[in-house]
Image (tube, rainbow, N blue to C red):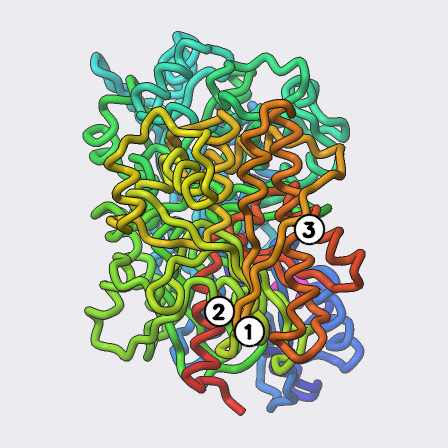
Amino acid sequence: MSTKKHPARYYIIYGHVQGVGFRPFIYQLAHRYALVGWVKNVTGCVHVHAQAPHAALEQFYAALSEECPPLAKIQHISITPCQALILNNFSILPSEMDTQAAHIHLPPDYFTCDACLAELYTPTDRRYRYPFINCTQCGARYTLINKLPYDRPFTSMADFPLCKACEQEYTTPENRRFHAQPIACPDCGPSLQFSDKNKQITDTELALAATINALQAGQIVAIKGIGGYHLCCDARNEATVKQLRQRKHRPDKAFAVMFPWQKQTAIPADLTEQVLITAEEYQYLSEPERAIYLLEKAQNYSLAASIAPNNTHLGVILPYSPLHHLLLNDFSQPIVITSANLSGEPVLTDQDSIETRLAHIAETYLHHNRPIVRPADDSVYQICHQHKMPIRLGRGSAPVELRLPFRLSKPILAVGAQLKNTVALAWKDRCVLSPHIGELSSPRSVEVFQQVIEDLQTCYHIEATHIIHDAHPQYQNSRWAQQQNLPTHAVLHHHAHASALMSEMNELPSTEAMCVITWDGTGMGEAQQLWGGEIFYGRPAHWQRIGSIRPFRLIGGDKASREPWRCAQALCWEAGITTWESEHTSPLFHHAWQQGLNSPYTSSIGRLFDAAASLLGLLDKASYEGQAAILVEQHANTKEHDFIELPLIKKTHYSEIDWSLLIEYLLDTRHSIAKRAGVFHRSLAHAAVKQVCESRQYTHTPIQHIGLSGGVFQNRYLAQLMIELFKEKGFTVTVLKIIPCNDASISIGQIIDAAHTLHLIES
């Protein structure tokens, strides 16, 4: 009957409210409180018209926030009295597009919920052992959405018409799959296909069985997941893991391991046998992101040694898709799971690419026919200073949305760094950070980089008016930016690192200055100098360099980042030390160093760590970025407290840490490698504190707030040590916790710095 005599309210609900079962939730609340009206998606928001007695409307509003779906994140609810209509029920209306509103939130991919897992293992359920089971609370999202609003016709499920049973679930408000866009079953949804050089199997259950047989036989299997393919093998089979390393040309960098999921309160024994893990860390592993976590190996570690050679830590991940659950449950032991890609490139996503480009690696393939719209690598975290620290944001975590500490007058796009590339799109007070793209050194990487930029602007209905890029003119993304028909602006690499901290510091007034230590590999600084050990004071667009390290030459330029002996040799020559010479050096190298031939000066802490690895005899040539620094950290004795007080070289506007005493100590073999590596860390940390404390002569004002930014602070021991030392001196210390401190944060920093520099902030 009509309820026109009752009050009417119009609600607009902002936040992460699409792709999380929000409309069914509203529908069920409306029936609980006898409301009439409707609910619909409008480009990223949920709009509700509701009529009922005043008390019922109040109860409805209270339940909105208190009982919202677990994956939903309400940011704001707008409530307006409105004209009552002649209505006699509550309904879900078709979605609408409103490109002017643009309150879109692109949901990440979600792990398989407990309810779907229960059905997956129930023999009488029609989705028993179906590898694509999902509901409104779980399943692929980011990797299958073509455009928003998030409706099935706009996803890669559009080519899978619903069967009658799924259609009934999809249209029944009381069903937990009501308006679940990726809904599917064995009768109407995607299926698996197994292939090797001898046969093809198109039956899903038989394809699963063939995959298990291949793993048990010691084969390498390429398995298509949510965001791309993984290369997988038995984690206990040393011969197969070695073979995977050889074929992938990945001699040292650790592989991740997926362990079977066991829903229980205690940590499963197969995990505690391999890694040292606390209840809190197990909780992190079990979170919806289902990210890889770097955990210390247990003393009785018994998996294949080649999974993480010369490494004290193991990357651990739990199953997140129904396919993973079925495979791990059937195989009943851990498997190696690593991205199916060529080094530095985004993960491969389609059958043709995987069977042609990686045919020399995989022996068998497990495909499925649900298209992946865009690639997404697994996210990677570690635990540092009592917090989880992101190293790579991908499937399950990204895209990441941050609230800017200001409001933009125009939308802007930032294209990030050359390594660990991400892009960021910002408008009004919103900034969206893309998932990890990778190193922009191959055609495929650049192709995905361009695709992500196009997808972000298309999905969010935002067209950038400015492009912000790194100051290095030879970076692929800098070149791309210059080729577009838009105004561009370059931001110094380390200014972007410093400014990125402001994305997580909304409590600090934008006018208040802070001191940021930006330690990383190398980045373009002022006057074409290669920086990497800088300390800045100020705020975005107003950074003053107050600290650095004594510069030294990089013999061979970029080659020095993969050949630590070059850094070690240059430091010895710079310090006047003639008692050490690398077996790789020659008079030609010394001549190049003397004349500065392809040997630019740098102030890089990252390259200083590389030199330490070589001087300690740990590594002369690295097979992956950061390998040398990881070895120095993992060999360090962290129980002692001794350090060398390094002198500061006073300059006109800043000071430099003189590292020469460290080089002499690193070569002193009377001390163990562990002791020397520990002293190396502590000496740098104490030198940075001293440098900041003595910097008032350059800032002319006391410093209260300290920030740590840059890839060097992925070093847990160094980061924790510096946090403690600065706090002892009375400083407050900020580190990034939502986005990585490495170059993945550069795009966010570019947004914040350029917004101030270009005066794009609304007053």
Q: Element under label 1?
A: loop
Q: Is residue 27 magenta?
A: yes
- Label 2 sits on residue: 431
Mark 2 to mark 1 CA distance (whole Å): 7 Å
Q: Which residue occupies 46% across, 37% down?
A: 577
Tell me where residue 732 appears, x and y as whole percent.
Answer: 74, 64
Q: Is residue 451 visible?
A: yes
Q: Which residue occupies 67% across, 73% down?
A: 696
Residue 549 in the figure: left or right of residue 507 = left
- Label 1 sits on residue: 404
The stretch in magenta equals: 26-31
Q: Which one is in front, 302 or 607?
A: 607
Q: Quadrant of residue 88?
A: bottom right
- Neighbor class of circle 2 (other Cα within 10 Å; few <14, some 14-19, many 20+) is many
The reply to whether dot 2 and dot 1 touch (C-beta < 8 Å) is yes
Q: Which mark is residue 686?
A: 3
- Image quarter (top left, top right, bottom left or bottom right) of the C terminus: bottom right
Q: Which one is in front, 250 or 130?
A: 250
Q: Say which label, 2 or 1, has the lower sequence index.
A: 1
Tell me where residue 509 appears, x and y as whole percent.
Answer: 66, 79
